[in-house]
Image: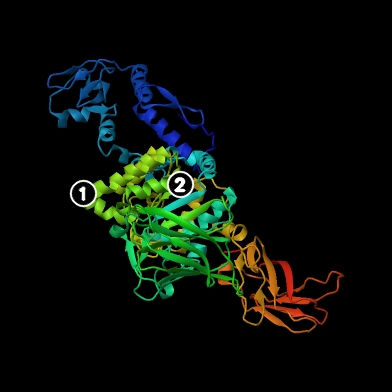
Amino acid sequence: MAFNTGNPVEPNGSTDPRDLKDNATILDKLVNGSDLSWLGRLGKVLKTWAGMEKDFSDLLLRSGFESVFIPYAAGAIIDRATQLVQRNGELYRVINQADLPLTLTGNWAADELKLFAVGDAGLRANLNSPTGTSYITRGTQTLEQSLLNIDSTVTQVSDRTESGVFGDSNMRTRIRSSISANPSIYILGDSISHGAFAGDSYRNSWPNILKRCLNLDFGSISYGFTPLMTMGAGPTLTQDIHEILLSPPGAWQAREASTGSYIPQGLSWVSTASGNILSSTIPTFQNRVFVWYIGNPGGGTFDIKINGVVAASVNTSAASVTPINVQVVALTADKAGFSKIECVTTSAAKVELCGFSYVGPENTLTVNNFSNSGRRLRWVDESVINSMMNGTALFIMALGYNDSGDNQTNPAYFSEFKQRIDWLISYANLYEVPVVVPDFVWIGDPTDVTRLELKRLAKETKGVYIPFPDMFKKAYGAASDLYRRDTLKLFTDGAHPNIAGHKYIAETVAKRLGLSCTSKKQALDFYDWWYPLNIADTGITALGQTSDTVSAVKNNGSQYLLRLNLTGLGIGVANAKKIQFAWPARAGINQAFSTVHSLAPKTDGTPQGTVVITAGGDITANPNTNNGSTSNFVFVSAPTSDKGAR
């Protein structure tokens, strides 16, 4: 079916992929069809090859040449000027009529001097050869090169058409219809989606940028599951919102890869002694924490403590291994605005913990990033796929890179990989789950077996396939690791995108899903979380203990918003109190200039002092002698220097 966009050609030609697909169809009719003419994209009547051949035949007739040709041979006689001689498919006429009648000798070297070619057999032979398109130029390129570009573009257009790029609002509608029953989204990925080389993964990894975009459209503020471990060290350190500690050293044993195929998150930590601790410390930017664990026959017990206080006790014993279990606990902030979550084993039986989700209000969308460095689809059990598909509004399948090498060389391994693609298709269709497949097999061409399977997953679930390797390739052929790193400057090494690469991936996925926010800058400027302040240890403490009430800051376009909910101010004493020394780096605040704001006045309007905020985020409360309360609430809106986050 033609798109017929009507897009103009001038001044530089249409770049709409739909026009390229229409042009490819029209070109096929012009070259190979039997019609004498065909309509171009803008309705202009164009001559086909068949039409030009007929015009040539008619030209011969109009020129007076006879349509019955004389075969070239010794002794053949040409009597009239209108007769043509045919040799090896080419047509010739007698040059000088004075030579008529002309008897041919059969010696072509002698006869050729008296004949003149009037046909196009040589040209047709060249055009009909395997390299025929190289004889025609189109701008600065040969037709051969142009057709290769068109073929590549048409393939991409076809991929996008099949996978929903022109129906992306459809995908968003499918997600929305699933959220009421399953307010979760799962990302299944490896180190790329874990956030390797993203630096501050909280702000820079593609899943965390996408979370902000999804939250806008689906009315959520949750952060969701966060991969447990940091990656790299020094300048290559990648860390998410939490700081994870395992104690005592060596007490917890990891289960991952082939030993952790039953674990949805791809990694668990196992304790077989009492008193072992797995802890996470976060700024209190969410209301609740989900503690994920594996149920095991004969499983042990553990307590969940929030800032040292037991909030829940959990028994992990189950009749069989159950991969998805959560204990929900409310988060409360300490005096500095942080929450320390500790899982403390209380028995010597097996306790298997998978990590933490940081979640806002109940029954709102939560994006759970089940990615782990080195993860492979081959090491994901059917039970895991079933349990995830049965509880999600959208499934993002970002595995494949680590499988691709073995898929090419090991038929048995590829068979197992393909089986898991079959399971994903089966359960996605059973539970009517929308599927998105970002293809990160950077080094594979379009015929790579792993890439073909990823594309099949999207196609057979009516999902979205995103061919990232094709987006990073050169005009002719696949891109090398060096090209992606040094020329495009989107990668740190052959496998991992850098901060700019993560931005590109997040924005592309958001666009394919038809989301309202499709820009990292927009996501950080307008749809970031309130980030708790770094409260200084000067006697000032956070009055609020929940994510809605702690002292916190966030960007709001060209301004920042600040709420101060504090206690520890002196009564009746003019005594300056330091609140914080600098903006939290993860808040991304770039204040334009220093500002002064009033503390909340007394009920009769009497001023109680001021708050001074320097450009770098140094905040000082200055209560005056009229101050009548140790607590105060101040809300500030002030401009940022760069008109928004970066």
Residue 433 locus on image (x, y percent):
45, 42
Question: In this figure, which residue is indicated by the disc labeled 2?
Answer: 391
The answer to which of 314 and 435 lies nearer the viewer is 314
Residue 137 locus on image (x, y percent):
37, 41
- Please, which colouring scheme is shown? rainbow
467 relative position to 98: left or right: right
Among the 4 quarters of the image, the one containing residue 330: bottom right
The answer to which of 636 and 253 lies nearer the viewer is 253
Question: In this figure, which residue is indicated by the disc labeled 1?
Answer: 412
Mark 1 belongs to which amino acid? Ala
Residue 231 locus on image (x, y percent):
40, 68
Residue 489 locus on image (x, y percent):
43, 62
Instruction: State the SS at label 2.
Output: loop
The answer to which of 532 and 346 lies nearer the viewer is 346
Q: Earlier in the sequence, mark 1 or mark 2?
A: 2
Mark 2 belongs to which amino acid? Gly
Q: Looking at the rendering, in which quadrant would you find the C terminus?
A: bottom right
Q: Is residue 127 visible?
A: yes
Of the residues tagged 1 and 2, which is closer to the observer?
A: 2
Using the image, tell me which numbered label, if any, was put on residue 231: none
Q: CA distance from mark 1 to mark 2?
A: 31 Å
Q: Residues within 10 Å of mark 1 (few under 14, many from 20)?
A: few
The answer to which of 234 and 294 lies nearer the viewer is 294
Vertical placement of residue 459 versus 520, above or below = above
